[in-house]
C-alpha cells in the first residue's frame, strides 16, 4: 500500500573527509556539498529500505534494539546514511527512540493496530473512490495506473499459489499503493506514505484468508469499471475485514 510494500536503516557521523563515509569525488576535484548530497540521499534510501524489509520480514523482531554500528556493518555502509535511515523509520513509526540512546523495533500493541485502522479506513476508501473517478473521467482510454494495479493483483495471486508469504505481502502492499497512485491525489499519496511501513508490517503479521484476496479482485473490478461508490463500498468491507483478522491473529480476539 502501499503505502507498501514494499514495498530499511542506520548511521553514525562520518564527515566530508571521513574515509568511512560514502562520498566520492572525481580525481583532482574537491568534494562539494551539492556533489555529495544526491549520493548520500540515495544511500540513505537504500539503507531505509533494507532495514524496513528486515523489520517487515521479522529478521529484526519487535522490541529488538538496533545498534547503528552493527546495522552499518551488516549493510556494508558507513554509519551516516544508516543513521539517517533509522531516523526516517522512527518517523514512519517502525522504530522508536530508547530513553537514553539508540532505537528499537516498535512493538505493535492492540491500541496501535486500532489507531492505524481508524486512520487507514477513510483514506483507503477515498483512494478507491478517486481512482475509480479518474478511470471514469479518462474513458474510453484506460489510465496507465490500471495496468499497474492489475499486475500487482496478479503477483499477489501467483505468490499465494506458490505459498510465498513475503512476496504475497509485498504484492498486497503494492496493490493498495497502486490504488493511491491511480487516485492522482499527491496529498493523499504523501499522507499514505506515512502509514506504508506500519501497514506492511501489519500485513506480514496477520493471516491472509482467501476471502480477503478475493476482495482485492472485487475492488479492482469496480475501480477498473469507474464505479466510484461500489469501489468505495468494497474497499470499506475489505479494510474492516482486515481489521477483524488482524485483531484475531495478533491478540486472539474471538
Image: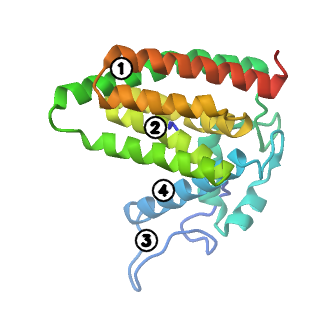
Above/below status of 41 relative to 86: below
Question: Residue placed at 70% from the left, 52% from the top?
Answer: 54
Labels 3 & 2 near each other (Cβ < 8 A): no
* Residue annotated with mark 2: 177
Q: Tell me, for residue 129, which label it has, or none.
A: 1
Mark 1 vs mark 3: give the one in front.
1
Above/below status of 114 relative to 61: above
Mark 4 vs mark 1: give the one in front.
1
User: Disc 2 on helix, strand or loop?
Assistant: helix
User: Disc 1 on helix, strand or loop?
Assistant: helix
* Residue annotated with mark 4: 41
- Which residue is more in the foreground, 182 or 20? 182
User: Disc 3 on helix, strand or loop?
Assistant: loop
- Which residue is more in the foreground, 121 or 137? 137
Q: Earlier in the sequence, mark 4 or mark 1?
A: 4
Q: Earlier in the sequence, mark 2 or mark 1?
A: 1
Amino acid at each position: 500500500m502501499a503505502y507498501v510494500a514494499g514495498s530499511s536503516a542506520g548511521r553514525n557521523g562520518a564527515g566530508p573527509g571521513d574515509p568511512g563515509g560514502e562520498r566520492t569525488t572525481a580525481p583532482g576535484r574537491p568534494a562539494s556539498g551539492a556533489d555529495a548530497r544526491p549520493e548520500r540521499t540515495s544511500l540513505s534510501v537504500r539503507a531505509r529500505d533494507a532495514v524496513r524489509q528486515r523489520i517487515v520480514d521479522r529478521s529484526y523482531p519487535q522490541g529488538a534494539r538496533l545498534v547503528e554500528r552493527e546495522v552499518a556493518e551488516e549493510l556494508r555502509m558507513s554509519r551516516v546514511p544508516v543513521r539517517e535511515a533509522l531516523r526516517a523509520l522512527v518517523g514512519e513509526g517502525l522504530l522508536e527512540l530508547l530513553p537514553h540512546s539508540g532505537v528499537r523495533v516498535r512493538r505493535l500493541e492492540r491500541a496501535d493496530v486500532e489507531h492505524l485502522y481508524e486512520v487507514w479506513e477513510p483514506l483507503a476508501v477515498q483512494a478507491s473512490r478517486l481512482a475509480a473517478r479518474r478511470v471514469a473521467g479518462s474513458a474510453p482510454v484506460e489510465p496507465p495506473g490500471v495496468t499497474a494495479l492489475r499486475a500487482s493483483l496478479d503477483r499477489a495471486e501467483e505468490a499465494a499459489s506458490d505459498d510465498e508469504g513475503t512476496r504475497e505481502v509485498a504484492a498486497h502492499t503494492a496493490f493498495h499503493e497502486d490504488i493511491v497512485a491511480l487516485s492522482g491525489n499527491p496529498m493523499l499519496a504523501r499522507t499514505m506514505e506515512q502509514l506504508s511501513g506500519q501497514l506492511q508490517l501489519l500485513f506480514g503479521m496477520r493471516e491472509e484468508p482467501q476471502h480477503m484476496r478475493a476482495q482485492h479482485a472485487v475492488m479492482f473490478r469496480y475501480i477498473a469499471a469507474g464505479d466510484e461508490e461500489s469501489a468505495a463500498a468494497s474497499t470499506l468491507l475489505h479494510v474492516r475485514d482486515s481489521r477483524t483478522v488482524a485483531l484475531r491473529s495478533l491478540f486472539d480476539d474471538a
